[in-house]
Image: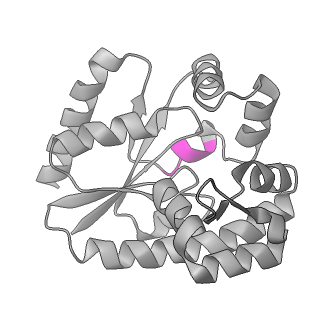
Amino acid sequence: MKIIGLTGGIGSGKTTVAKEFEKLNIPLFIADNISKKLLATDETVIDAVKTLLGEQSYIGDNAGKLVPNKKFIASKVFSDQELLSSLNKILHPAVRQYFDNWIKEQNAPYVIYEAAILFETKGNEICDQIILVTASLKERYRRVMARDKVTEEEVRLRMSKQWSDSQRIMLSDFVIINEDLQELGGFVRSIHDVLLKN
């Protein structure tokens, strides 16, 4: 079964594109969602994160259950490249192991592996082909500020931790410019047809 990597910078609209593939009955693995799940539930990950960032990394919710203190974790890692790298070294192998188990249960011509930092974590090495999603910087800022309720400066800081589109394009097989939602379905169906033939 082919693994098709789907990536793009923050705010490019990767998840919107991924859902278009899902409409075509293509299994979808969203690495960020699994990463969040493991951060909250996997004891090995939880212990490693506490060791790296301190006990403040987890707080009690309304039911008294320990949950990731996302604001604290973000404040630590987005201003410290070394800490971010160390956190990624905890999360990405765990996500990869989860994916290896997940793909065994799939039955399709190919699966979509969606990851924001696919190249940065060498996730592209397990992919047969790569789809890159891009959008204008202005549009990406607008989307992330609205979605995450953050400032332009915070978005800029997050973007600085990721590869640029010009770096990603060199290693991608397909590029989707995600500016017009009405055209998106057509772009995805075209790529789907090509992937079925190859």
Tell me what residue is drawn at x 76 percent, y 50 percent: 74
Q: Is residue 48 above or below residue 109?
A: below
Tell me how the rendering is colored: one colour
Tell me what residue is drawn at x 21 percent, y 74 percent: 105
Queried whether the magenta region covers residue 168, the answer comes back as yes
Residue 165 image position (x, y, % from top left): 59, 38
171 horizontally vs 157: left or right: left
| Residue range corresponding to the magenta coloring | 167-171
Q: Is residue 186 visible?
A: yes
Residue 152 image position (x, y, % from top left): 76, 24
113 horizontally vs 2: left or right: right
Of the 4 image quadrants, the one containing the N terminus is: bottom left
**Nearer the observer, 48 or 172:** 48
Residue 96 image position (x, y, % from top left): 47, 73
Tell me what residue is drawn at x 66 percent, y 60 percent: 68
Residue 175 image position (x, y, % from top left): 41, 36
Q: Is residue 139 above or below residue 158?
A: above
Tell me what residue is drawn at x 77 percent, y 64 percent: 57
Q: Is residue 81 above or below residue 116?
A: below
Q: Is residue 175 visible?
A: no
Of helix, strand and loop, which mostly describes the magenta segment? helix
Queried whether the magenta region covers residue 75, the answer comes back as no
Of the 4 image quadrants, the one containing the C terminus is: bottom left
> Farthest residue toward the bottom?
44
Count of numbered badges drawn on the protein: 0
**Nearer the observer, 180 or 95:** 95
